[in-house]
C-alpha cells in the first residue's frame, strides 16, 4: 500500500529525509515517531505528492508520487499538521466544499455525511464556524473532510498535537474504526502512548529511519536491563551514574531516572556508589522498557537497525 | 471542471461576505477615493491670493487691476505700500502673485511704448506657478487687445470727423482656440475617468494577490493541494469573484462620476465593460503573479504597491507620456494603465467607438494573456 525506496530530501545542505526505505502493508496502522525536526512533516508531504523529493521514489495506494501525483491524490486522505480547513466557513460548508472538490454525487454525499456525523458527533455543530470549534472538534472535522472520498490510505501529520487527552482517545477510536474497514493509516505523532497503539512503529531521527517494526519487536532490540531509580537527589545521582562503567543509557523522567545496564551484577556496585555520595535510594527496580526508552536507547547508541 | 470552479467561487464569495473589513475595501473604499479625488484632483486654480502694488494710481492702472479681480481667478487680499513689503508677503507665503505697476505706467503707454509691469509668482510649486502664469498671460493679452482697439477706434473716429481718412476695413486676425470634448477644460472631467482606472487596478490586483497568499499563510492551501483539483480550476475559481467585484466597482464609480460629479459619458457601456474585462485580465494576472512571488500577505501588498506607484506615474495619468525620456516611453508600453486610461477617457469624454480604440484594447489583451500564462505556469500545486 505504501512503499518508500531510497527517499532523499535535501534543503540546501540540510538533509531532511535521509535515504529512507519503508513498507506498510494494506490495512496496517503504522506510527511515525521522532522528535521535532526529525523530518516527519517533510516525509508526510512527500508521500502526499505535494513536495517533490530530491531523489528516490515512493508508491502510495499503487501510484507513484511523482509520475501519478494527481491520481494518487484521489486515493489518499492527508491531514496537514496545521488545521487546513476554512475557519470562516461553517462545519457544513467545509464538508460541502471538500465533497465538491472530490466530486461526490448527491447520494454519496448523503451517505458520507451520515457516516462522518455518526462518528464525529459534529451534527449539532454543523452551522458553527469551524474557527469556533474546540481543538479536538476541529481535528475531527478535518478527519471527516479527508474521509469523504473514501481514501485507501490516510496520511496524518501529528493530528493529535495539542489536543486534550479525552479528545485524543476519541480521535483514536475513529481511526481504529477506519482501520477495520481496511484503510491503511500512516500517522506521525510525538506521543509514545499513541505509537504503542500502532501495529508498526517507525523511529525517525534526523531524517533517518533508526528502527521499524511492531512495538513488541522493537522492545526486544534492547538486549540490556532497564532500571528505574527514584531518589532524593536526582541530579547528583545522575552524575554518579554517568561515571559508572557498564551503564549505557541514562535519562531523566521527571523525578525518576532510567538507565540500562549490561550486567545485572553491577547493580550492587551502583548502590554503594550512590550511598557514598549521600544519595538516598527510595526505590530501585527493573522495568519493562517503553517505546520511549527504546527510542532514547537507540538514539544514544546510534545503533542502526533495519527491521521489518 | 466548471462544477469545481463554481464551488471554489461559492466558497470565496461566502468568505468575502463574512469579512466585514474586506467588504469595506471592496465597496466603500473606491467610492471614498472617488469622492476625495473628485473634489481634490483638479488642476484648475481659483482664489489665488494676490497683492497689488500700484504706484501709478491712475484710471488705467485700476482698470488693469479690476481685470484681475473680475476674472474670478485672483483674490486681491493685500495692498502693500512698498516693494519690500510685497516681497515679504511672498516670502511668508501669504500671496502667490505680486503685481507691481510703475509710476510712469500711463505716460509710457500714451507714448505707445511697451510698458513693463512686474509680476512676481511663487514658484515653489512649479505646476501651479505654470498654470497661474498662463492665466496672467491670458489676462494681459486681452487687456492689450482692448487698448489697441480703443486707440484704433479713436483714431478712426477722429479721421472720419475731419474727413481726412476714408473708412477702411480692419482686418483683424484672431486666434480662437476651442477645446473639443471638454469645452470648459475642466480637469475633473479628465481626471475622474482616470481615477476609475486606478481604483480598478489597485482593488483587483491587491485582492487577487492577497486572497491566494492568505491561503498560504493560514495553511489551507496545503489541504487544497492534496485534492485532485487542477491548477486552472483553482485559479479560475479564486479570481472570478474578484473580476466580478471589479465590474461592480465600475458600475458604482461610473454612477457616482456621472450622477454626482456630472462627468459626461458619451460612449457605449458595452464597450466600457468589454475593455474593463480586458483590463482586468492584466490587473488580475499581475496580482496572481505577485501571489506566486510572496509568502505573506504583507509581501504581496508591498509588491502591489511597488508596481502601482510607477504604473501611475508612467501612465499619462498626471504627466504626458510624450514628455518622458525615450527609454521610459518604451517602458510604458508594458504598462496596462497607459492603454486603459486612453480607453476610459475616450469612452467617457469623446464617445470613442471600438474602431478608434481597438489599437489600445489589443495591446492590453496581449499583456493580459502573457501575464496570465506566466503566473499560471508559476503557480504549482506544490509546497515551498
Image (cartoon, coloured by chain):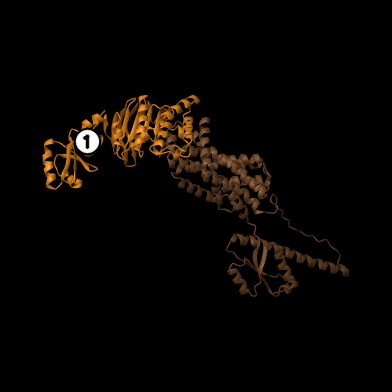
Foreground residue, A25 or A267?
Answer: A267
Foreground residue, B191 or B314?
Answer: B191
Q: Residue at x 65, y 67 (%)?
A: B50
Please say if A169 is above or below B87. above
Please say if B266 is above or below B40. above
Q: Is residue B294 left or right of residue B280?
A: left
Please say if B162 is above or below A216. below
Residue B273: image x %, image y %? 62, 40
Shown in orange, the chain is: A
Q: Is residue B248 left or right of residue B12?
A: right
Instruction: Kindly identify which chain the residue marked by label 1 belongs to.
Output: A
* Colour displayed for chain B in the image of the structure: brown
Residue A169: quadrant of the picture = top left
Residue B303: image x %, image y %? 48, 47
Residue A230: image x %, image y %? 19, 42
Which quarter shows the C terminus of chain B? top left
Give the SS element for disc 1.
loop
Classify mark 1: residues with Cα within 10 Å, few (<14), some (14-19) or many (20+): few
Amino acid at each position: 500500500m505504501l512503499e518508500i525506496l531510497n527517499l532523499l530530501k535535501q534543503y540546501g545542505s540540510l538533509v531532511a529525509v535521509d535515504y529512507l526505505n519503508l513498507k506498510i502493508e494494506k490495512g496496517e496502522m503504522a506510527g511515525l515517531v521522532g522528535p521535532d525536526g526529525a523530518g516527519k512533516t517533510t516525509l508526510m508531504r512527500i508521500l502526499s505528492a505535494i513536495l517533490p523529493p530530491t531523489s528516490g521514489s515512493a508508491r502510495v495506494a499503487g501510484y507513484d508520487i511523482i509520475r501519478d501525483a494527481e491520481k494518487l491524490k484521489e486515493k489518499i486522505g492527508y491531514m496537514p499538521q496545521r488545521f487546513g480547513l476554512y475557519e470562516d466557513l461553517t462545519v457544513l460548508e467545509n464538508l460541502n466544499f471538500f465533497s465538491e472538490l472530490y466530486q461526490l454525487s448527491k447520494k454519496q454525499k448523503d451517505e458520507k455525511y451520515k457516516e462522518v456525523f455518526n462518528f464525529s458527533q459534529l451534527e449539532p455543530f454543523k452551522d458553527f464556524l469551524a474557527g469556533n470549534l474546540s481543538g479536538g472538534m476541529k481535528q475531527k472535522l478535518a478527519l471527516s473532510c479527508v474521509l469523504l472520498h473514501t481514501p485507501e490510505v490516510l496520511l496524518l501529520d501529528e493530528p493529535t498535537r495539542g489536543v486534550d487527552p479525552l479528545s485524543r482517545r476519541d480521535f483514536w477510536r475513529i481511526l481504529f474504526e477506519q482501520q477495520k474497514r481496511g484503510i491503511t493509516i500512516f500517522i506521525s505523532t510525538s506521543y509514545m502512548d499513541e505509537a504503542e497503539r500502532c501495529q508498526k512503529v517507525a523511529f525517525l531521527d534526523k531524517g533517518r529511519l533508526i528502527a521499524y517494526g511492531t512495538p513488541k519487536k522493537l522492545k526486544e532490540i534492547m538486549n540490556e536491563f532497564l532500571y528505574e531509580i527514584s531518589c532524593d537527589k536526582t541530579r547528583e545521582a545522575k552524575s554518579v551514574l554517568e561515571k559508572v562503567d557498564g551503564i549505557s543509557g541514562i535519562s531523566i523522567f521527571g523525578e525518576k531516572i532510567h538507565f540500562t545496564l549490561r550486567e545485572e551484577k553491577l547493580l550492587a556496585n551502583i548502590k554503594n556508589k550512590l550511598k557514598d555520595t549521600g544519595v538516598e535510594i527510595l526505590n530501585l527496580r527493573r522495568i519493562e522498557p517503553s517505546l520511549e526508552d527504546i527510542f532514547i536507547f537507540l538514539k544514544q547508541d546510534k545503533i542502526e537497525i533495519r527491521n521489518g | 471542471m466548471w462544477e469545481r470552479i463554481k464551488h471554489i467561487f461559492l466558497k470565496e464569495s461566502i468568505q468575502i461576505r463574512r469579512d466585514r473589513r474586506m467588504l469595506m475595501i471592496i465597496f466603500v473604499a473606491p467610492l471614498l477615493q472617488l469622492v476625495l479625488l473628485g473634489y481634490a484632483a483638479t488642476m484648475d486654480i481659483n482664489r489665488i491670493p494676490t497683492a497689488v502694488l500700484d504706484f501709478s494710481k491712475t484710471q488705467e492702472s485700476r482698470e488693469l487691476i479690476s481685470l484681475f479681480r473680475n476674472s474670478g481667478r485672483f483674490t486681491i487680499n493685500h495692498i502693500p505700500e512698498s516693494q519690500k513689503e510685497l516681497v515679504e508677503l511672498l516670502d511668508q507665503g501669504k500671496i502667490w502673485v505680486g503685481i507691481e505697476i510703475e509710476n510712469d505706467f500711463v505716460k509710457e503707454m500714451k507714448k505707445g511704448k511697451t510698458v513693463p509691469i512686474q509680476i512676481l509668482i511663487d514658484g515653489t510649486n512649479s505646476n501651479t506657478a505654470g498654470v497661474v502664469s498662463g492665466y496672467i498671460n491670458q489676462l494681459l493679452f486681452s487687456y492689450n487687445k482692448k487698448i489697441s482697439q480703443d486707440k484704433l477706434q479713436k483714431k478712426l473716429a477722429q479721421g472720419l470727423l475731419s474727413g481726412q481718412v476714408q473708412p477702411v476695413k480692419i482686418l483683424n486676425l484672431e486666434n480662437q482656440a476651442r477645446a473639443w470634448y471638454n469645452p470648459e477644460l475642466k480637469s475633473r472631467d479628465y481626471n475622474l475617468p482616470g481615477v476609475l482606472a486606478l481604483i480598478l487596478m489597485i482593488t483587483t490586483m491587491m485582492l487577487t494577490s492577497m486572497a491566494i497568499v492568505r491561503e498560504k499563510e493560514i495553511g489551507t492551501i496545503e489541504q487544497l493541494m492534496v485534492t485532485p483539483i487542477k491548477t486552472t480550476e483553482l485559479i479560475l475559481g479564486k479570481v472570478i469573484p474578484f473580476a466580478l467585484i471589479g465590474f461592480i466597482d465600475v458600475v458604482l464609480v461610473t454612477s457616482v462620476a456621472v450622477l454626482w460629479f456630472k462627468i459626461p459619458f458619451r460612449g457605449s457601456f458595452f464597450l466600457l465593460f468589454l475593455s474593463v474585462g480586458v483590463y482586468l485580465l492584466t490587473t488580475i494576472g499581475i496580482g496572481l503573479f505577485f501571489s506566486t512571488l510572496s509568502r505573506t500577505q504583507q509581501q504581496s501588498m508591498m509588491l502591489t504597491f511597488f508596481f502601482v506607484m510607477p504604473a501611475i506615474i508612467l501612465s499619462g495619468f498626471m504627466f504626458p507620456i510624450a514628455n518622458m525620456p525615450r527609454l521610459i516611453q518604451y517602458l510604458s508600453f508594458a504598462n496596462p494603465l497607459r492603454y486603459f486610461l486612453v480607453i476610459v477617457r475616450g469612452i467617457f469624454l469623446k464617445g470613442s467607438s471600438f474602431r478608434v480604440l481597438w489599437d489600445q484594447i489589443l495591446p492590453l489583451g496581449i499583456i493580459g494573456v502573457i501575464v496570465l500564462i506566466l503566473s499560471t505556469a508559476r503557480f504549482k500545486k506544490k509546497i515551498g
